[in-house]
Image (tube, grey):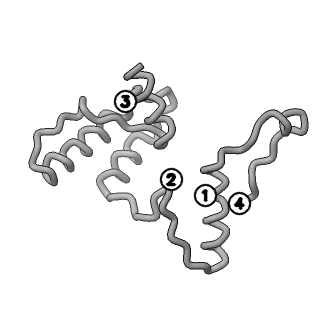
Amino acid sequence: MSPLQLSPALQHKLEPSPTLRINEMVNQMWAQGNEVYHLGFGESRFPVHPIIQQVLADNAHQKSYLAGQGLEALRVQIARFYTAHLGMNIKASQIMVGPGSKALIYALQMALD
């Protein structure tokens, strides 16, 4: 994967995300066969649970914007998982699914502001 290339007009004004750059470096090191302990946020190296894969596949045909809290079917499955594993009654309305930790942290800050 090649690093993000900014327009020359913007290079002096903007810099790529440091966290994304770290992820690129880690991926390059893994590709070279190096052992790397990546302790940062980002893409999980663990397999996606089959139930989540199915919910995402069932909704892959959608072409419109998703609900702000994420796919309801996915939130329902996440709530069921945590209800079973934590022994607490977790509702889908208490779950928020986002495109990554940065967007979710930003949403949390805006909600608390």
What percent of the width, then of the height, locates residue 45? 46, 64
Question: Which is nearer the N-term, disc 2 or disc 1?
Answer: 1
Q: Which amino acid type is marked by label 1?
A: Asn
Question: Which is nearer the N-term, disc 1 or disc 4?
Answer: 4
Q: Name the image quarter holding residue 1.
A: bottom right
| Extreme residue in the top direction | 113
Mark 2 sits on what residue?
42
Kindly indicate whether the residue at mark 2 contacts the one at mark 4 (C-beta within 8 angstroms).
no
Mark 3 sits on what residue?
69
Kindly indicate whether the residue at mark 3 contacts the one at mark 2 (C-beta within 8 angstroms).
no
Mark 1 sits on what residue?
23
What percent of the width, then of the height, locates residue 75? 29, 38
Q: Is residue 96 rendered to the left or right of residue 7?
A: left
Question: Which is nearer the N-term, disc 2 or disc 3?
Answer: 2
The residue at 40%/29% (across/down) is 108
| Helix, strand or loop for disc 4 | loop
| Helix, strand or loop for disc 1 | helix
- Residue 4 bears which disc, if any? none
Question: Which is nearer the N-term, disc 4 or disc 2?
Answer: 4
Q: Which amino acid type is marked by label 3?
A: Gln
Question: Which is nearer the N-term, disc 4 or disc 3?
Answer: 4
Mark 4 sits on what residue?
1
